[in-house]
Image (tube, rainbow, N blue to C red):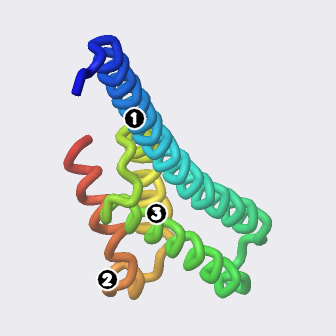
Amino acid sequence: MFVNPFMAIASEFIQIIVAAIYAITLFYTIVTFQRSKKLDQITSLGDVMNELRDVDRELAKIPSGSQFDDVRNSWYIRMFNSLDWLSFTINERVITDKKLIEYIKPMIISYYEETFLKSGSVNERDSSHYQQLKKLYQTVKKEV
């Protein structure tokens, strides 16, 4: 059987084009996945930051005085839970973007030293609660 050399070249050319299209598609799929992962991390961090901002606003509205300590304490618990959740996502590598982590390091140190240690009850500071926050603080403090 006679094979036309032109047909063989055209067939190889088509295979090369198909392989190139497949490689380009794979490349864009990987890029899209990476962007989606980064966007998810930004969204998660944004949710926690919004929660912390809301708690800060509510704490600012509470009048000073020991009669409001219970109300104030409930808001601090909510803040510490949000910080612990953020710490968990970083410690467990759910949030891995180095720029995002570098951005929040000073915030973690500030919340821990100025709020958790000063406003958290002795039971909260010494108990097994907020272990992720404590772990992240120790890690961040070593790096600074």
- The image shows residue 136 at horizontal and vertical percentages of 31, 61
Q: Residue at x 38, y 83 (%)?
A: 129
Q: Residue at x 34, y 71 (%)?
A: 132
Few, some or many residues within 10 Å of mark 2 (<14, 14–19, 20+):
few
CA gap, disc 2 and disc 3: 20 Å
User: In the rendered structure, which disc, 2 or 3, sits on the residue that comes first in sequence?
Assistant: 3
Quarter holding residue 106: top left
Secondary structure under the numbered disc 3 in the rendered image: helix
Contact flag, marks 1 and 2 (Cβ < 8 Å): no
Q: Nearer the viewer, mark 2 or mark 3?
A: 3
Few, some or many residues within 10 Å of mark 3 (<14, 14–19, 20+):
many
**Residue 126, numbered label:** 2
Residue kind at label 1, given as amino acid type: Tyr
Secondary structure under the numbered disc 1 in the rendered image: helix
Contact flag, marks 2 and 3 (Cβ < 8 Å): no
- The image shows residue 66 at horizontal and vertical percentages of 67, 82
Q: Nearer the viewer, mark 1 or mark 3?
A: 1
Looking at the image, residue 2 sits to the left or right of residue 33; the answer is left
Few, some or many residues within 10 Å of mark 1 (<14, 14–19, 20+):
few
**Residue 22, numbered label:** 1
- The image shows residue 99 at horizontal and vertical percentages of 41, 37
Looking at the image, residue 105 sits to the left or right of residue 5; the answer is right
- Residue 16's place in the image compared with 37, above or below, is above
- The image shows residue 144 at horizontal and vertical percentages of 26, 41
Looking at the image, residue 138 sits to the left or right of residue 106; the answer is left
Residue kind at label 3, given as amino acid type: Leu
Read off the residue under disc 3. Answer: 86
**Residue 116, numbered label:** none
User: In the rendered structure, which disc, 1 or 3, sits on the residue that comes first in sequence?
Assistant: 1
Q: Residue at x 78, y 71 (%)?
A: 63
Residue kind at label 2, given as amino acid type: Asp
Q: Residue at x 33, y 12 (%)?
A: 6
